[in-house]
Image (cartoon, rainbow, N blue to C red):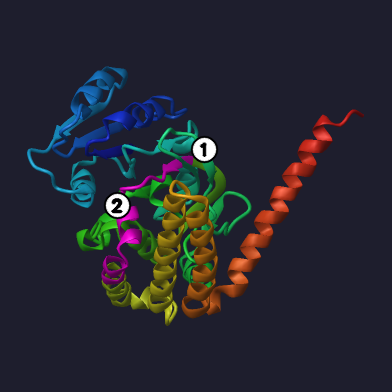
Amino acid sequence: MLTVILPNFNHARFLGQALGALVKQSKPADEVIIIDDASTDDSVAVIESWLPRFTNARLVRNRTNLGVVRNMNLGLEMAAGSEIVFVAADDVVYPRFFETLLALLSQYPEAAFASARTDIIDSKGDRVDTLNAPVPLDRPGYIEAGIAAELLMYDEAWFTGNATIFRCAPLLEIGGFPEDLAAFTDGYVSRVLAAKFGSCYTPEVLAAWRRMEGGMSWTYTEDIARARKLADRAQAALDDRGDLFIKGYPERWKRRYLFGAGRSALANARRRARSESLARYAIATIREIIGCVWLFATLRPGDTWAVLHRRLTDVHKHISRIDSSRRRVLPS
C-alpha cells in the first residue's frame, strides 16, 4: 500500500502540475495526504479543486507554518501505507514512477527504498537537463548495504528525494527525518538506509526536480557560512552512524557538499551577471571556471577519477544517442 505525502507552502502556481502528475500515474497511490503549511496564496483553493479527482485524497491544514521537514515527519506518522513517497509541490513525477519503483520493492523486500534518475525542469516546467548523478546499475536491480557504502565513498549519492519511494518500517526505525539537517535531511536519511538495509535502483528517468531560485536548497548555496554550519551538523550526524559507512566518509561527504555549495554560488553569480552586461558576464564566467578548479583541487582531489569517469560515460552516451538518431533518419 502506497501513501503519498505532499507538503505545500505557497506553491499554488505549481500545484496543478504536481497533482496532475499524481492523477496520471499508471498505478495510482492508495492514499494521498496533502499538508498545507499555512499558505497565504491560493494554495488551498487549488488543492480543494483537485480533491474530487482522487478517490483517496485528503487535505490537512496547519494553523501555523511548521516547515517542510516537520511536515514530512507528520506525514510519516499519519501514513497508513507500508510504502511512502514525499512529493514536493513544485516537482513532477512521470506516469510510471509508482508502478516501476513499487515493482522493484516487491522484487527485493529487503530494500529500504527504491530510486530512479531525475530530470531538471525550470520554473515554467520545461526540461533543462537530466541530473548528472552517478548511475550505479545499468538496469533495474538491488544494491546491497555493503556495496552501497562503497559506492557512496567512491562517487557519492545516486538517489534524490524527489525520485524515491521509501518503505515506512525502516524509515521509522531510524527515527524519520532530522529537522536540524534542513535541505540535507532526505539525503542523510537515504544514505543511512542504503548503508543499513540496501536499496533498489533503476536508471530510468521517472521524475523531474524543479530547480528554482529561492528554494530551500538554493538558500544554502547563496550563504556559504550557513552551508558550512549545515555541513558540520550533517557530518556529526553521519559520524554518529559511523559503523554503517567506510572510515573517512563523513569528512569526504562534507568536502563534496562544500564543493557543491561553492560551485552553485559561482554559477548563480554568473547567471545574475548575464542580465547586467556582457563584460560582467565574461568576468563572472572566468571567475566560475577558475573558482571551480580551485574548489575541486582543494576539496575533492580524491574524486578526480570517479568524476572524470562519469563525465566521459555521459559524453559517450550522448554521442551514441546522436549516432543512433542519425541512423534512424538516414535513408536506407
User: Which residue occupies 52% across, 42% down?
Assistant: 128
Density class for disc 2 (Cα within 10 Å; few <14, some 14-19, many ≥20) is few
Identify which residue, 77 or 164, lies in the foreground.
164
At 67% across and 58% down in the image, what residue appears? 313
Position in image of residue 271 (x %, y %): 45, 51
> In this rendering, is residue 2 above or below 51?
below
Callouts 1 and 2 close, C-beta under 8 Å: no
Q: Earlier in the sequence, mark 1 or mark 2?
A: 1
Q: Quadrant of residue 196?
A: bottom left
Vertical comparison of 252 with 171: above or below: below
* Numbered badge on residue 216: 2
- Which residue is at 44% across, 29% downward? 27
Secondary structure of the residue carrying tag 1 is strand
Residue linked to disc 1 = 127
Q: CA distance from mark 1 to mark 2?
A: 20 Å
- Look at 20% across and 46% down and name the residue there: 71
Query: What's the residue type where badge 1 is placed?
Result: Arg
Question: Is residue 219 highlighted in magenta?
Answer: yes
Q: Nearer the viewer, residue 55 or 317?
A: 317
On the image, the x and y values in percent for residue 224 come to 32, 67
Query: Along the line of sight, which residue is nearer the eye, 326 or 238?
Result: 326
Location of residue 1 with respect to 56 vertically, above or below:
below
Q: Would residue 217 be found to the left or right of residue 138 on screen?
A: left
State the count of labels. Answer: 2
Residue 274 coordinates in the image, percent (x, y):
48, 49
What residue span does the magenta drawing correspond to? Answer: 207-229
Q: Secondary structure at mark 2?
A: helix
